[in-house]
Image (spheres, rainbow, N blue to C red):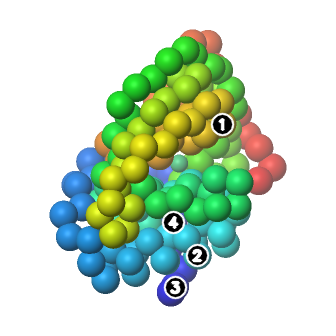
Amino acid sequence: MALRTIRTDDDPILRKKSRPVENFDERLFELLDDMKDTLIKAEGLGLAAVQVGVLRRVVIINMDGKFVELINPEIVKQEGEQKEAEGCLSLPRRAGVTKRPYSVRIHAFDRFGKKHAYNGTELMARCFCHEIDHLDGILYSDRLAPGETLYPTEG
Ligand code: NI
């Protein structure tokens, strides 16, 4: 396991579309293990592979201290609306209020290629949407609620 470098700001890779994972192999396991270490070290809530420079549809989320690995995740249902502040490890020291669904249901594979469904509301819904957006080159700064702008934070 190793820490990987988190890409930030205007790094062009953050705007690229990630490709689906086809091989659930050792290389994927290594990527996921490294992403977990990197996420823990950065004290983040979620991390997409593109943020460490790998254009594959791979996400890891810290769900109340439990790490959930999402391979080829897809939103299959969304309901309602919420406007809350959001940040991103790739846009350090900033935050902004986004408009997101209140709840989402997603499908994703685990590292062994088994398909799972997850439901998220409030924070978890934002997190699922935020991370899946990364896989399509979309940043939360693209999803600001009307009239909102990015603002500086301490972290
Ligand atoms: Ni992010």
Is 124 above or below relative to 111? Answer: above
Of mark 2 and mark 3, the one earlier in the sequence is 3
Distance in Å between CA atoms under marks 4 and 1: 22 Å
Q: Tell us which disc is closer to us: 3 or 4.
A: 3
Is 103 above or below relative to 90? Answer: above
Mark linked to residue 37: 2
Q: Tell us which disc is closer to us: 2 or 1.
A: 1
Instruction: Residue at the far left: name it.
Output: 22
Residue under pointer 1 = 123
Of mark 4 and mark 1, the one earlier in the sequence is 4
Cβ atoms at labels 4 and 1 below 8 Å apart: no
Q: Tell us which disc is closer to us: 4 or 1.
A: 1
Q: Amino acid at mark 1?
A: Leu
Distance in Å between CA atoms under marks 2 and 4: 12 Å
Q: Looking at this view, is 103 or 20 the one in front?
A: 103
Residue under pointer 3 = 2
Of helix, strand and loop, which one carries label 4?
loop
Q: Amino acid at mark 2?
A: Asp
Where is residue 131? Give x, y as percent.
47, 46
Where is residue 27? Give x, y as percent.
30, 80
Q: Amino acid at mark 4?
A: Ile
Distance in Å between CA atoms under marks 1 and 3: 28 Å
Of mark 2 and mark 4, the one earlier in the sequence is 4
Residue under pointer 4 = 6
Distance in Å between CA atoms under marks 2 and 1: 22 Å
- Quadrant for residue 53, please give it: bottom left
Of mark 1 and mark 3, the one earlier in the sequence is 3
Of helix, strand and loop, which one carries label 1?
helix
Where is residue 78? Give x, y as percent.
45, 23
Cβ atoms at labels 2 and 1 below 8 Å apart: no
Of mark 2 and mark 1, the one earlier in the sequence is 2
Please indicate, yes or no, whether residue 119 appears anywhere in the rendered image: yes
